[in-house]
Amino acid sequence: MEYKIREAKREDMPAALELIKELAAYENASEQVEIYVSDLEHEGFDEGNFKCFVAEVNNKIEGMALVYFRFSTWKGRTLHLEDLIVRESMRGTGLGGALYKRVVKYGHENSVKRVEWVVSEGNKNAQEFYENTGADIKKNWYTVHMDETGIQKNID
């Protein structure tokens, strides 16, 4: 199978949102997707808040990886992989691995001290894949989120 990994363009954002919604449906969380194509276009291309890479097969976007820079008080500049998504029909083809390698290369090109992401406790295939690439899964750390209700509660 021939594929192409490239930086996303503004006009790729409808396909990116389609992939995001596909992942949410796969995780039984469709109702949690609150963004629109216009949000992706504005935040990624007008504000520069993220970089997105896409995987094309036969000129169709079949996968994506969305990343942004963070800063660690211990390490300095880091790269956060928010999501790496491959269409269900394309899983197992090497597309995800190619996107993953592009993200790591992008981190290296930008001299980050760490590439970081979160993986679901139930996604054993991904955990095994990441560990086989040399990634260290921090099992003694917890991801903490505060939603809009919590934010509002803390500013009142």
Image (cartoon, rainbow, N blue to C red):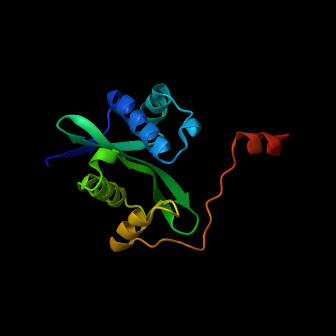
- Where is residue 151 drawn, in percent x and y? 74, 43
In this orientation, which residue lies closer to the viewer: 104 or 90?
A: 90
Q: Is residue 57 left or right of residue 65?
A: left
Q: Is residue 99 above or below residue 23?
A: below
Q: Is residue 82 left or right of residue 57?
A: right
Q: Is residue 88 left or right of residue 23?
A: left
In this orientation, which residue lies closer to the viewer: 118 or 113?
A: 118
Q: Residue at x 75, y 40 (%)?
A: 149
The image quadrant that residue 74 belongs to is bottom right
Q: Residue at x 48, y 60 (%)?
A: 119
- Where is residue 128 drawn, in percent x and y? 38, 70
- Where is residue 33 drawn, in percent x and y? 54, 37
From this viewpoint, which residue is outermost toward the right?
A: 156
- Where is residue 98 drawn, in percent x and y? 26, 55
Quadrant that contains the C terminus: top right
The image quadrant that residue 46 belongs to is top left
In this orientation, which residue lies closer to the viewer: 74 or 100?
A: 100
Q: Is residue 128 above or below residue 105?
A: below
Q: Residue at x 33, y 61 (%)?
A: 108
For the image, the number of numbered tags is 0
Q: Residue at x 33, y 27 (%)?
A: 11
